[in-house]
Image: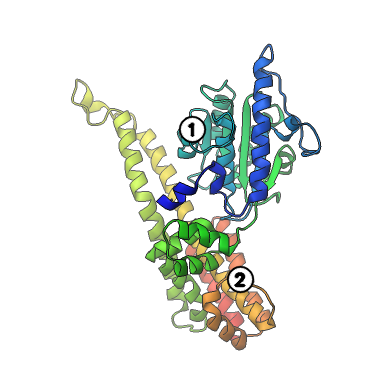
Amino acid sequence: MGAARLARVTSVFDRLVGQQHVVDELAAAARSARAVSSDIALAEDGAVSMFSDDSGAGTVPVRSSMTHAWLFTGPPGSGRSVAAQCFAAALQCEDPDVVGCGHCHACSTVMSGTHADVRRIVPDGLSISVKLIRETVQIAARRPATGRWQVVLIEDADRLTEQAANALLKVVEEPPSRTVILLCAPSVDPEDISVTLRSRCRHIPLTMPSVSAIADVLTADGVDAETARWAASVCGGHVGRARRLATDDQARSQRTQALGLARAATRESTVYGDAENLVRTAESVAKSISAEMDEAETEELRTALGAGGTGKGSAGALRGSAGVLKDLERQQKSRRTRLQRDVLDRALVDLAALFRDAVVAAYGAPVAAMHPDMADQTHRMAAYAPPERLLRCVEAVLECREVLDQNVKPKFAVDAMVASIATALRR
């Protein structure tokens, strides 16, 4: 975040872009939470739950606007995890007048990820295990050490295994009096979050911020106006991606490579080579992102196990710890796989949006383009193939995303996708 941006931050909620309705709702709940916290403190045993459901929020006393379990949903880039983190900061905020002031020690530590009473689970691998959830829940059931609440924030809750979701459900159904659970997921679809878990949470839906709102954030960070407007118009509503496109040559190159598959599909001699290059690029990006983290984690673990010592018995310090190191290697490999799929999925979303723009152009629909800078190409695509074939291309990309989520090797999935696209375009 640039210096100009920091200067404008007067609340943690300033980090939410184009979500004023969400800010208002969360701020009201945080104010209510202070009253609830006081009520619990005054209770004789300190374990009486003061929460109530939110069915009548806004028309009942202020205390009922706070509850113990929350579900933040929205498409990638909408800011669902940011909203959850900001809410966690507002719950712990020490300012007597402003909830989520952004300046007190509690707000600063929550936003930096170092608050003692806020546990943030960010899945490194393909799923969130039941072991991790059980360990986190046991700690979160304790009384807060420094703050008002014990907060558990779970990003990508759609990656909870069935066992992990069931373990979490037990806590959501019978919450400790000072524990708040914040879940983040793409949607309320049963494939993203279990129906039972969803029914126990208060739902906060987030929407895509507007192009102008994203551009304003980028210009505040020091990006020139023209670049900011371009990045905001092609990022698909994802603020973080807009920032990368505006400042990172590699991110722009990856986007160009992904969009190039549409034209490559019409040339049988090069299409599979281009597809494999896309997969290799995703693998290379994932390795570069994880390499530094892997090295630091491995060295930290080896040091904890006694490596590098010079005292008596130090030569055998790592003896018997091979299994621990192997477990770490497996976790790191799972993280690299997840990163590769995330990078590849972003490329596929761009490609699907390009075909979608071509369908829109074919029908002359008054709909905003996802890739307005590619208007010439999308109009050529609309002239080259009828809408039904272009729609089949969109379906091929979406099918590829689905099979990748089912652990199909990326090379095979992408090759099958470009074969389907080539067939549709050349038919």
Does residue 255 appear to the left or right of 13 in the view shown?
left
Q: Are marks 1 and 2 in contact (CB under 8 Å)?
A: no
SS of the residue under disc 2 = helix
Residue 59, given in percent of the width and then of the height, sits at: 81, 38
Vertical side of 51 occupied by 380: above or below: below
Q: Residue furthest bottom?
A: 383
Does residue 51 appear to the left or right of 230 in the view shown?
right
Any part of residue 123 in sight: yes
Nearer the observer, 319 or 85: 85
Residue 214, given in percent of the width and then of the height, sits at: 54, 60
Any part of residue 176 in sight: no
Query: Which quarter of the picture shows residue 193?
Result: top right
- Mark linked to residue 65: none
Residue 367, given in percent of the width and then of the height, sits at: 67, 74
SS of the residue under disc 1 = loop
Q: Residues within 10 Å of mark 2 (few under 14, many from 20)?
A: many
Q: Residues within 10 Å of mark 1 (few under 14, many from 20)?
A: some
- Cα–Cα span, label 1 and label 2: 50 Å
Nearer the observer, 272 or 2: 2
> Of the residues shown, which amino acid type is indicated by label 2?
Ala
Vertical side of 64 occupied by 247: above or below: below
Name the N-terminal-most of marks 1 and 2: 1
> Of the residues shown, which amino acid type is indicated by label 1?
Cys
Nearer the observer, 220 or 263: 220
Provide the residue designation for mark 1: 104
Nearer the observer, 377 or 366: 366
Query: Which quarter of the picture shows residue 349?
Result: bottom right
Front disc: 1 or 2: 1
Quadrant (top left, top right, bottom left, bottom right) of the C terminus: bottom right
Provide the residue designation for mark 2: 396
Does residue 325 appear to the left or right of 116 in the view shown?
left
